[in-house]
Amino acid sequence: MRRLGVVALACCALTGCRGPHRSDGERLAQAYCAACHMFPEPALLDKRTWRTGVLPQMAQRLGVPAPSLFAEMHRDPAMVVLTKAVSQPDWEKIVAYYLEHAPDTLPRPTLPAEPQLDPPLFATGPLIPRMQSSAIITLLKTDSVNQRIFVGEAASNTLRVFDFDRHLKASLTLSSPPTDVISEKDRLLVLESGRLEPNDEPKGALAQYGVARDGSLHFAKILIDSLFRPVFVRDVDFTGHGRKDYVICEFGNNRGRLALYREDGGTYRRHVLDATPGAIRFEVLDLTGDGFPDIVALFAQGDERIVLFANDGTGDFSGARKVLARFPPIYGSMYFTMRDFNGDGKPDILYVNGDNFDYSRVLKPYHGIRILENGGRNNFTERYFFPIYGAAQAVVADFDKDGDLDIVTTSNFADSARHPERGIMYFENVGRYQFKPYAFSIARGNQWNVMATADLNRDGWPDVLIGAMDLKDIARIQRRFRGPASATAVDPILLFENRGSTVSR
């Protein structure tokens, strides 16, 4: 799911000085911009992007007077602005600090290993040849129990259901782009975004559809409404009483939340776990070791962070929370998952950052995938980083069946002039946090986003599905500074068929 959000660089509170500063501008920047998220170092962006893209947005949140009546009239009324505005002289010092210390251009990243092209493990091609689509895929999910593939897209707002033999079983036109589903034998719960572009309108919903014997879908009811641009949902029995709660990431924009919805007399009562925007994904696992399922969530707006919400044993998450990792507000957090990469029995974090749909649309050398190792007490340390411009998502599995975890990644802001093939990559685990990287020729010509895995051909080897994010403005932006971009690919969904059963290694 692309974030499409504003990087909220300004904070809602002030802090005092923190150690020595080289200038008044640095002191002011630290005071105003490090209270609510990590301090954004000037080196994270080039001078031009700070000056024309990010700093003007930052000024609005700091309460700096608008440069014109037109700009004042077009301020977002939901935007959080400092109660005590920054004075114009102080703002000019902050701007001078960033422009003085920012580089003219961002450096190109150094790769730990050079990617090879087209690994023999995967045979690549379209999932459905000549499939008609907007190619802005917002939902791609598989249900191995009922052998279903779900494909949702923006623009047309359609949801299509295929079986594992790739036959179309159902198609719906919704009022807004679907972003997630919960699949059961006789019913389907569809998370509808309301509006996909940045907004603070609570128009999203979780809708229930009945599944007929022939696989067709029939609307039943709205389970939960008034959601802020929801992007992710799971159902979990946190209390052990046999009743499912729904946890929903309501990404929003200026407003948003991570909320638990618990059934109460035929309706669902909202319990807000975190009232900040940017919740994009969570996982449920017992991270505290007390036998009860906890929630670990990624927030990707402004204060980019991964947070542990501990279950007190009764399904209550209102106690102390722990920030497991925090990232600068320009990192563009997109995805995470928790898997045991080093085999010590403790879940590590695979973190993906590469969102570039805001006010700093340049190729960033700190985009990519990171493995954060769990030290044993849920203290995490980075052990691996591979730079990937515009990294979007990842799937983790032992794709080659050699006993360790491999990774497949997508990018929706790849370097389309120099290395468009790196829009999709495979990382073969060779041990001790070392990976052999591969890129794919089929990735050229489009941007890629959502992913899913399933054994579609039932040979015992996990296959990968990859959905396109065909946004024409990406190519136009990159042509300004990288030369001509590739032409748009035709196929909106790719199938990477795992040939492990036939490929000799």
Image (spheres, grey):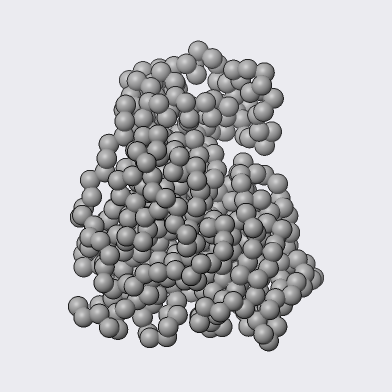
Q: Which of 84 and 337 is in front in this view?
A: 337
Q: Nearer the viewer, residue 355 or 38?
A: 355
Q: What is the quadrant of residue 330 in the picture?
A: top left
Return the x and y of residue 205 as percentages of the image width and height: 70, 60
Residue that appears at 27% across and 65% down: 118
Q: Residue furthest right?
A: 265
Please identify the quadrant where the C terminus is shown. Answer: bottom left
Q: Quadrant of residue 156?
A: bottom right
Residue 288 in sight from this viewpoint: no
User: Where does residue 462 sit, x and y in percent of width and height?
Assistant: 38, 77
Q: Which residue is drawn at 63% across and 66% down?
A: 159
- Observer able to see residue 267: yes
Q: Is residue 328 above or below residue 241?
A: above
Residue farthest along the top direction in this orientation = 89
Query: What residue sits 30% from the left and 46% below the top?
Result: 418
Residue 111 or 304: which is nearer the viewer? 111
Residue 46, position as x, y percentages in the image: 36, 30
Whether residue 310 is situated above or below residue 213 in the rendered picture: above
Q: Which of 12 and 425 lies nearest the eye of the viewer?
A: 425
**Which residue: 66% across, 50% down?**
195
Whole-percent x, y for residue 15 in the image: 49, 29
